């Protein structure tokens, strides 16, 4: 009995192998006939899609469940489109120009406490003006290179004739005037709307 059961098992796997080989042969023959028909009619073969998946051939030695799983592989997949995270556009607050003028501006790198009472910070975008209210926002434009920076008035000065603004070191760097020391500027006093 053991021999006849083994004989049936070998015979069954041989039939399965033959059936798979026959199916693979039929698929190959159909593909070859399609290509031959296309070439014979003068048309080119269809272009493969960019997103087409490669389907491996089913090896004949795989059991039935694994062979069925391989056959379920999709023939086409859609190309993956990545959505870029859309950042909301930053809106700068609308400003209105209250006044302004032209003069020379200098900068100071160190000093005691400012007239507003806060300690002087050379890396803050601040400036000194003789008459503007503390906390005023002023756009300063370097007339030599058209670079600009918005500063906050927190100190009084300069007290040199012909100069109207004393900028912090960071503000002067932003408009490219550190090497000159004194630069011609146009300034605009801004008011938030």
Image (spheres, rainbow, N blue to C red):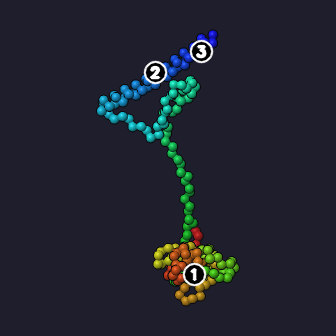
Q: In the rendered view of the protein, which quadrant contains the N terminus? A: top right
- Mark 1 = which residue? 107
Residue 190 in view: no
> Does residue 192 appear in this view?
yes
The residue located at (51%, 76%) in the rendering is: 176
| Residue 2 located left or right of residue 81 | right
Residue toward you, 62 or 88: 62
| x, y percent for residue 38 | 34, 30
Number of the front mark, 2 or 1: 2
Mark number displayed over residue 22? 2
**Residue at horizontal 56 percent and vertical 17 percent from the top:** 10
Q: Which of labels 3 and 1 is toward the front?
A: 3
The answer to which of marks 2 and 3 sits earlier in the sequence is: 3
- Which mark is drawn over residue 6? 3
Location of residue 29 by image quarter: top left
* Residue drawn at (30%, 33%) of the image: 42
**167 or 50, which is in the foreground?**
50
């Amino acid at each position: 009995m053991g021999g006849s059961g083994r004989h049936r098992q070998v015979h069954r796997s041989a039939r399965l192998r033959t059936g798979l080989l026959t199916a693979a042969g039929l698929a190959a023959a159909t593909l070859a006939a399609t290509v031959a028909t296309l070439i014979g009619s003068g048309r080119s073969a269809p272009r493969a899609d960019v997103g087409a998946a490669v389907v491996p051939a089913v090896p004949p030695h795989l059991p039935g469940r694994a062979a069925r799983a391989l056959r379920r592989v999709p023939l086409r997949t859609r190309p993956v489109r990545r959505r870029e995270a859309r950042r909301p556009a930053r809106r700068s607050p609308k400003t209105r120009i209250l006044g302004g003028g032209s003069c020379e501006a200098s900068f100071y790198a160190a000093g005691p406490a400012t007239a507003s009472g806060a300690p002087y910070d050379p890396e803050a975008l601040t400036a000194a003006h003789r008459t503007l209210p503390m906390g005023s926002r002023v756009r300063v434009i370097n007339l030599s290179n058209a670079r600009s920076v918005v500063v906050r008035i927190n100190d009084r000065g300069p007290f040199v004739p012909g100069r109207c603004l004393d900028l912090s070191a960071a503000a002067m760097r932003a408009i490219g005037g550190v090497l000159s020391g004194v630069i011609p500027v146009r300034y605009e006093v801004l008011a938030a709307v």
